Image: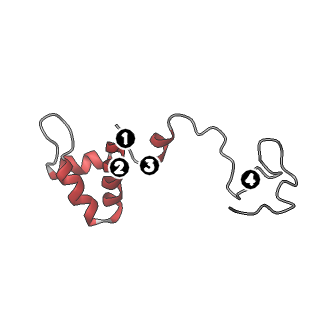
Amino acid sequence: MRKKHAFSNVGMDPDGHGILGFRAGGKKASKGKGKDFIQKAIKKPGALRAAAKKAGAIDKDGKIKVSWLKKTAKKGGTMGKRANLALTLRKLK
């Protein structure tokens, strides 16, 4: 168990935030991320789909093939990062 210092709560409000908005652990306090924080993380929506369409990796249902995503994620680079994010977001459904 971690021992608390005598001055650990100096300058803290009841919520545990300090004078500058930092929590006791040193992390910045979040001010309501909102429900659409993942959508804001995607910088260029449609870029992965455009690359998949160019590579012929869209199936007849209009979905990107998982095999193409896995292959592209292994390549690396910006497109690999996008494919890796797509595979990760797929797990959240």
Which image quarter is the C terminus in?
A: top left
- Mark-to-mark CA distance, 2 and 4: 30 Å
Residue at screen point 77% across, 42% down: 15
- Callout 4: SS: loop
Give left or right: position of 18 versus 76: right
- Mark-to-mark CA distance, 1 and 2: 7 Å
Give residue 89's position: percent from left, percent from top: 36, 45
- Callout 2: SS: helix
**Residue under numbered circle 1:** 92
- Mark-to-mark CA distance, 1 and 3: 19 Å
Q: Nearer the viewer, residue 13 or 48?
A: 13
For the residues labelled 1 and 2, say whether their Cβ atoms are less than 8 Å apart. Answer: yes
- Mark-to-mark CA distance, 2 and 3: 16 Å
**Residue under numbered circle 3:** 43
Q: Nearer the viewer, residue 68 or 12?
A: 12
Give residue 16's position: percent from left, percent from top: 77, 47
Q: Quadrant of residue 33?
A: top right
The amino acid type found where label 1 is placed reads: Leu
- Mark-to-mark CA distance, 4 and 3: 27 Å
Q: Nearer the viewer, residue 63 or 30?
A: 30
Closer to the eye: label 1 or 3: 1
First-in-chain label (2 vs 3): 3
Q: Nearer the viewer, residue 3 or 93?
A: 3
Q: Quadrant of residue 64?
A: top left
For the residues labelled 2 and 4, say whether their Cβ atoms are less than 8 Å apart. Answer: no
Q: Residues within 10 Å of mark 4 (few under 14, many from 20)?
A: some
The amino acid type found where label 3 is placed reads: Lys
The amino acid type found where label 4 is placed reads: Phe
Give residue 9's position: percent from left, percent from top: 84, 53
**Residue under numbered circle 4:** 22
Residue at screen point 23% across, 56% down: 70
- Callout 3: SS: loop
